[in-house]
Image (cartoon, rainbow, N blue to C red):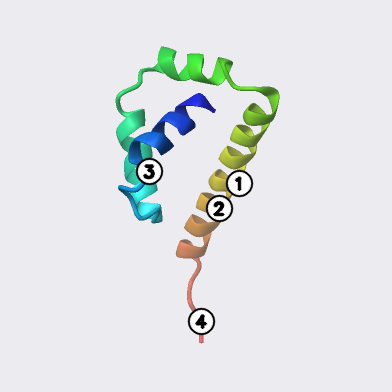
Amino acid sequence: MKLVDEIFEMYKGKIRGSQEDLDMIAFTILEQLDHHELLEMVKELSEDELAYFIRLYIVESLKGRLERLEDTKPFYH
């Protein structure tokens, strides 16, 4: 994805690559984009990139739901 290539070049050597760094970069970029711009980015994805994008969304969404489910389970010894 062109955006990822541009971000990588911009931040190469400036970040440690921790999850916190990557989240901060992603959130900073996303808060600058509106709905239309996000859809345009999706339209530019190749079929493989789009499939990866959707797979990642599904996996991360399921992880979040499982974590919330675990947080609500009572703890027994």
SS at mark 2 in the image? helix
Q: Quadrant of the N terminus?
A: top right
Q: Residue at x 42, y 29 (%)?
A: 6
What kind of residue is marked 4?
Tyr
Give the label on residue 37, or none. Answer: none
Frontmost of labels 3 and 2 is 3
Report how far apart the C-alphas of labels 4 and 1 lie in the structure.
Answer: 29 Å
Report how far apart the C-alphas of labels 1 and 3 lie in the structure.
Answer: 27 Å
What kind of residue is marked 1?
Val
Report how far apart the C-alphas of labels 2 and 4 lie in the structure.
Answer: 23 Å
Vertical placement of 57 versus 3: above or below?
Answer: below
Residue ID for mark 3: 12
Residue ID for mark 2: 63
Q: Residue at x 65, y 22 (%)?
A: 46
Q: Residue at x 30, y 24 (%)?
A: 32
Frontmost of labels 3 and 4 is 3
Residue ID for mark 1: 59
Frontmost of labels 1 and 3 is 3
User: Residue 74: image x %, image y %?
Assistant: 48, 72
SS at mark 1 in the image? helix
User: Residue 54: image x %, image y %?
Assistant: 62, 33
SS at mark 4 in the image? loop
Give the label on residue 76, or none. Answer: 4
**Would you say the residues marked 3 and 4 are in contact, meaning their CB atoms lie under 8 Å apart?**
no
Report how far apart the C-alphas of labels 3 and 2 lie in the structure.
Answer: 29 Å
SS at mark 3 in the image? loop
